[in-house]
């Protein structure tokens, strides 16, 4: 525990200077979840974007206004500092402050999953403890990837096990090969699913066969699989996924929650029709144009999107026209 406090000291100094104080600050660290204790991850989670001012500073007031609007959508909770939150461009202090701000702005019955991944195991442990103190209910831990050639199954199992052993909150594995160039190996997922403090996986790879196999092989572990994209949400529900963390939920959150409800009720034809209308907008805000497109679409739908942090650039006029077409031809604009 002394080591954890020593690792966290620089992060705490930054957080203490901010006006948002995390709920339960100073209460001391809890112990990891006991075996058999599992968060219920069923539902839709938007991975929140981070609003910035014209000067490039984090705009907490606009973030709070977005959350106020999201209160009308039946989300299970929120992911903070996921890929669409531009977390690699934020300082550790900014990352913690954003999580604290969100925690204070949303009801306690909404789960808060906070991205705490860093390249080193030591850094990830420190950030995970910090996210817990800032009010996160679970840590979403991306695969370390800078030395991806050395990230064998054994290395990743050791990394995640060390993080989960030290974490005061449950851990959710996060595989996003489009950003990391590294897919969390199936054998690593199956081994880690047995850890009492690892409760699930967010998989953004889009391989439905792989997802189905993970669901099948981990049923006895009560391991939960979250689909990482709205483009294959219907397919994910069909093979037993429990929910989705979908960037498109920042824009069309009510529609994704409707798709979830249709699947739960077995209304598969209606679900299919809705899913098909979501594919092109989802492609536009993910692999085609990315975060600048998410933020632009948010502006069109009445949310605060705003600029990205450099080196991300705004969309060109041609890209804006194509993005608008992808939404409008499917009836969303």
Image (cartoon, grey):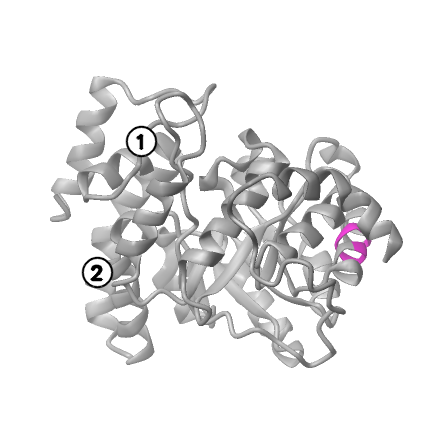
Q: Report which residue position mark 2 lands on.
A: 274
Q: Is residue 295 left or right of residue 92?
A: left
Q: Quadrant of residue 145?
A: top right
Quadrant housing the C terminus: top left
Q: Is residue 6 left or right of residue 212?
A: right
Q: Nearer the viewer, residue 35 or 111?
A: 111
Note whether residue 290 is visible. Answer: no
Badge 2 marks a residue whose secondary structure is helix
- Contact? badges 1 and 2 (CB < 8 Å): no
Q: Is residue 159 magenta?
A: yes
Q: Report which residue position mark 1 lands on.
A: 306
Q: Which residues are magenta?
A: 158-162
Q: Is residue 192 left or right of residue 112?
A: right
Please name the residue shown 30% across and 48% down the image.
65
Residue 75: x percent and y percent?
36, 64
Category of crowding for the residue at label 2, using alpha-carbon neighbours closer than 10 angstroms: few (below 14), some (14–19), many (at least 20): some
């Amino acid at each position: 525990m002394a080591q954890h406090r020593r690792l966290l000291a620089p992060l705490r100094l930054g957080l203490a200077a901010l006006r948002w104080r995390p709920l339960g600050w100073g209460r001391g660290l809890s112990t990891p979840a006991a075996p058999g204790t599992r968060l219920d991850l069923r539902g839709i989670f938007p991975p929140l974007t981070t609003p910035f001012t014209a000067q490039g500073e984090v705009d907490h007031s606009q973030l709070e206004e977005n959350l106020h609007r999201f209160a009308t959508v039946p989300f299970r909770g929120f992911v903070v500092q996921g890929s669409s939150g531009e977390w690699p461009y934020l300082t550790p202090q900014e990352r913690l402050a954003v999580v604290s701000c969100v925690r204070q702005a949303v009801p306690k019955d909404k789960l808060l999953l906070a991205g705490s991944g860093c390249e080193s195991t030591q850094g990830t442990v420190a950030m995970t403890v910090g996210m817990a103190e800032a009010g996160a209910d679970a840590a979403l831990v991306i695969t370390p990837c800078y030395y991806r050639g050395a990230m064998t199954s054994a290395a990743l199992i050791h990394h995640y096990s060390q993080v989960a052993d030290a974490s005061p909150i449950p851990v959710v594995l996060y595989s996003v090969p489009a950003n990391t160039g590294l897919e969390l190996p199936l054998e690593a997922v199956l081994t880690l699913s047995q850890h009492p403090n690892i409760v699930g996986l967010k998989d953004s790879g889009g391989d439905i066969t792989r997802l189905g196999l993970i669901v099948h092989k981990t049923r006895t572990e009560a391991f939960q699989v979250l689909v990482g994209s709205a483009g294959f949400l219907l397919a994910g529900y069909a093979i037993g996924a429990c929910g989705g963390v979908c960037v498109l939920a920042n824009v069309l959150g009510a529609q994704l929650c409707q798709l979830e409800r249709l699947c739960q009720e077995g209304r598969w034809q209606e679900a299919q029709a809705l899913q098909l209308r979501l594919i092109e907008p989802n492609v536009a805000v993910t692999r085609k144009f990315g975060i600048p497109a998410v933020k632009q679409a948010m502006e069109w739908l009445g949310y605060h999107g705003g600029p990205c942090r450099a080196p991300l650039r705004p969309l060109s006029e041609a890209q804006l026209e194509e993005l608008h077409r992808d939404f409008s031809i499917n009836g969303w604009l």
